[in-house]
Image (cartoon, grey):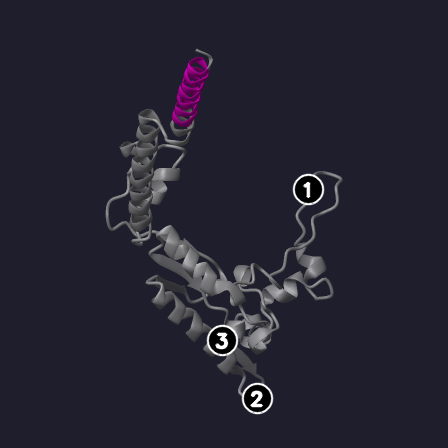
Amino acid sequence: VAPLFAAHHHTIKAALLTEMDTQTFMARTTRSCPSRATRTAVGIIMVAFVLLTGVFTYHAIQIGSNRGTLLWTRWNSGRHDSSSKCFPVGFDWAVATAAYQVEGAVSKDHRGRSIWDVCCDPKGPWFGKLKPGVPTAPGQPSLPAVCGDEGINMRYTFEDDFQTMRHMGVDSYRLSISWNRLMLWDAKKKSMVPNPAGIAYYHQLFRSLSRHAIRALVTLYHWDLPYDLYLDTQIKHGAGTTRL
């Protein structure tokens, strides 16, 4: 009886161990394999990601198509509804600058002085008379005069600036010509003569605008008069005109 009981005991023990191992294996397998609910959630997230990517790509293409309407619609006073699309297709989106305010680089390209350079010069003849400082409040000192020595240094950054304009959907750009950079005063001829370095700069600028498909609208004169030309008697005393 004892051997039989011992054999039976070992059989029961083996069966119990097998059952425990099976339960352990099933528990581990259940933990390592995602449930149906988990797989469903992952699938929904992936589909949503694909859809959002498509939407953002579509808007990027629309905004990059050189039309600022959608960009305006998105940011116009926080309104996102269709009623804010108040600009028709073909509306000309444009920005504008003046050379003296943005170019900077006053010592580049053999640029001459303009009347504004002299006006802002503390040692110049006009500084004390024209009082370019702006009073902050009664009894307070004036703010210093703001000169165009640096501006925003667009002389060096126009490539990046035009790329930004293109991304914004700008169609046209109104700019002025700095005659102090484009031409120089010839004392013997009593007239302005072309400045090769200035001409080369404006060639680069207009070629860049063309590459970015931005139309140039040129202001021929934005009060940026060469100082040497101003000193000519015909200009200074208003007796006539001096040819540029």
Q: Which label's residue is closer to the chain start, 3 or 2?
A: 3
The residue under label 1 is which amino acid type?
Answer: Thr
Which region shows up in magenta? 3-26
Measure the alpha-carbon separation of dots 1 and 2.
46 Å
Q: Which label's residue is closer to the chain start, 3 or 1?
A: 1
Measure the alpha-carbon separation of dots 3 and 2.
19 Å
Measure the alpha-carbon separation of dots 3 and 1.
37 Å
Q: Which residue is mark 1?
A: 136
Is residue 194 something one can see in this rendering? Answer: no
- Do labels 1 and 2 touch, CB within 8 Å? no
Residue 222 lies in the magenta-colored region: no
The residue under label 3 is which amino acid type?
Answer: Leu
Q: Which residue is mark 3?
A: 182
Report helix, strand or loop for mark 3. helix
Q: Position of residue 24 (x, y in %)?
A: 43, 24
The residue under label 2 is which amino acid type?
Answer: Lys
Q: In the image, is 179 to the left or to the right of 211?
A: right
Which tag is nearer the camera, tag 1 or tag 2? Answer: 1
